[in-house]
Amino acid sequence: MRASRFLIATLKETPSDAVAISHQLMLRAGLIRQLASGLYTWLPLGLRVLRKVEKIIREEMDAAGAQEVLMPVVQPAELWEESGRWEQYGPELLRVTDRHNNGFCLGPTHEEVITDLIRGEIKSYKQLPANFYQVQTKFRDEVRPRFGVMRSREFIMKDAYSFHSSQDSLQETYDGMHQAYCNIFDRIGLDYRPVLADTGSIGGDGSHEFHVLASSGEDDIAFSTGSDYAANVELAEALTPTGERPAPSEEKQEVATPDQHSIDEVSAALNLQADQVLKTLIVLGEAKEGETQPLVALVLRGDHELNDIKAEKLPNIAEPLTFAPEDRIKEELGCGIGSLGPIGLNIDVVIDRAATMVADFACGANKDGFHLTGVNWGRDLALSTVADLRNVVIGDPSPCGAGTIEIKRGIEVGHIFQLGTKYSEAMSATILDENGKSKPMTMGCYGIGVTRVVAASIEQNYDDNGIMWPASLAPFQVALVPINLHKSEAVKAKCEELYEQLTAAGIDVLFMDEVKARIGVMLANSELMGIPHNIIVGDRGLDSGSVEYKNRRDGEKQDIAVDGLFEFIQSQV
RNA sequence: CGGAACGUAGCGCAGCCUGGUAGCGCACCACAAUGGGGUUGUGGGGGUCGGAGGUUCGAAUCCUCUCGUUCCGACCA
């Protein structure tokens, strides 16, 4: 590609509303431009990168036996009503109406459409297993789009859906997809980890997320120091602390704590560590027939954080997890939020495992302005329901049994689920089995955020001068930078020759052929755009039969003999 | 959805408090010089100051409403 005929839309200054490094660099290098909140245009340079990601994904999906299809972005409301998600999905689902007043949505995902397709096409267990994928635009009306294409409203996703006549068959394909994802992210050159994950609103059984490790990630990933266990913090189990609870050594006592509401304030006032104070959170429970939702108390150690997902999975707790309004708490429990405690509550109480191991603890007295100290389980109040309610923290024993927990930030770039029969049952996607009996197909689904992968790669590959693309994603492998192109016939001739030669060999070259361009500008642009290999051709070098080569990543320059240059570049890319 | 901030040329910003003919840097166009790492000079083009209403002789500036964008917290590839 000749720079004179290619939109190089680099910016010297960082647009002020970009915060994430990848967002800043994607704007500065001229990969994307924003149209509106969460909506981006991919410029020629960015699209080249995007296409490389897609190509790798297609190759690996094809190799894993999946078939490519392409489903519509606009989907009829009826299908979503059939699966029950028209109600469930919430405002993230952008709903539209056509001229005949029929309801549609912009697809945030395609389970409904693929299930509808396959129930019409596949009738026999003999046609299974089957796995279909697409690379398609999705739309999710995110509450808060941010970080450029990292969390945009419209984005490109590779989604795949597999169909099976048995769980074993699903497991086999699931494992195959797991491997295919590893192959994809390996080829893309990401530092990533597959981690155990929650299945979220899609539901089902097994699930892994693929996370790119980066400090800007939005998820916390728990790792074991003693094994390759890794799980999203929202899922990682917090084990019951080992050992015995110490025996009570203090008497229960009521102390005045005026104006002390938070754990920090209370522990400071009582001169206790936060782990000696228990906090009591009030959430809405599952309503019985015709009644309002009851209140449920959750008790955790003061230094621990409630895990919403674990909590809402409990049978007596409403999903989604909702904190009780303060006026209801005051009215029904008789005190404000800052003075709650588990003693004497006449509602369901669920105690976190770790909280059960604390002796002589402090907690709210259920009386405004008072706390209790020296409280002990068994002696002062009964241990009722115990559950895992909290997020694991650094240093916890790993649930795998070996080592302790370490936490890092991750960007979720892929997610694989075992869906089971959730959609096939709701939508009557059945097959006849070996015995001629009708049964719902077992399904899996597998997603990769294609546009997000581009941003994630930048988060792991940049320096002060710009992007440093891995070879697999670079929009161009080589920048051909002439010096005094307009003056030197020798430079011009050599550049044209090299350009032809490299291009003919299938190497993507950006020939900086603009007559007026200056060396500094060209190199700064090349570095910002992240082109891995730079060839600088000038008279001085040519006089001694060489050109300069500069590697983007290590910044090393070397003079290469013109004669051996083609072979040298071939060996580099 | 709750909290906060910001909308002035393609980008980055000043001007607003204290109302009086809209500015700077980068980018862009022309000419010239320069030419081995974002060069320099001269000259130019481009903005109904997000929008609507109000106050005023006069509004980018003050007031009201509205739209948009971003940031911080609960959801997801």
Image: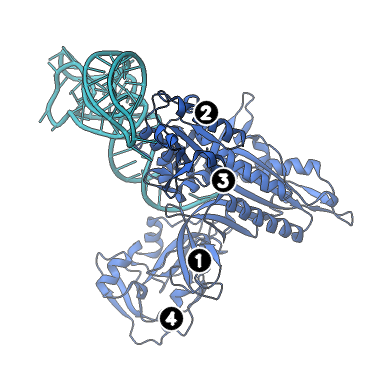
Chain colours: A blue, B cyan
Q: Earlier in the sequence, mark 1 or mark 3?
A: 1
From the image, tell me which residue sits under label 4: A377
The amino acid on which the numbered mark 2 sits, given as a three-letter code, is: Glu
When the figure is inspected, residue A124 is found, relative to residue A277, above or below; the finding is: above
From the image, tell me which residue sits under label 3: A472
CA distance separating discs 1 and 3: 28 Å
Q: For the residues labelled 2 and 1, say whether their Cβ atoms are less than 8 Å apart.
A: no
The amino acid on which the numbered mark 1 sits, given as a three-letter code, is: Phe
CA distance separating discs 2 and 1: 52 Å
Q: For the residues labelled 2 and 3, say whether their Cβ atoms are less than 8 Å apart.
A: no
Q: For the residues labelled 1 and 4, say whether their Cβ atoms are less than 8 Å apart.
A: no
**Same-chain check, marks 4 and 3:** yes
When the figure is inspected, residue A285 is found, relative to residue B17, above or below; the finding is: below
The amino acid on which the numbered mark 3 sits, given as a three-letter code, is: Ser
Q: Earlier in the sequence, mark 2 or mark 3?
A: 3
For mark 2, name the chain: A
From the image, tell me which residue sits under label 1: A223
Q: Nearer the viewer, residue A98 or A454?
A: A454
Q: Earlier in the sequence, mark 4 or mark 2?
A: 4
Looking at the rendering, which quadrant does residue A79 occupy? top right
From the image, tell me which residue sits under label 2: A496
A233 vs A207, left or right, is left
CA distance separating discs 2 and 3: 25 Å
Q: Residue at horizontal 41%, vertical 62%? A: A332
Residue A563 in percent (x, y) is at 53, 39
For mark 3, name the chain: A
CA distance separating discs 1 and 4: 32 Å
| Badge 2: residue crowd in 10 Å (few <14, some 14–19, many ≥20) | some
What mark, if any, has residue A351 been given in the picture? Answer: none
Label 2 secondary element = helix
A292 vs A442, left or right, is left
Q: For the residues labelled 1 and 3, say whether their Cβ atoms are less than 8 Å apart.
A: no
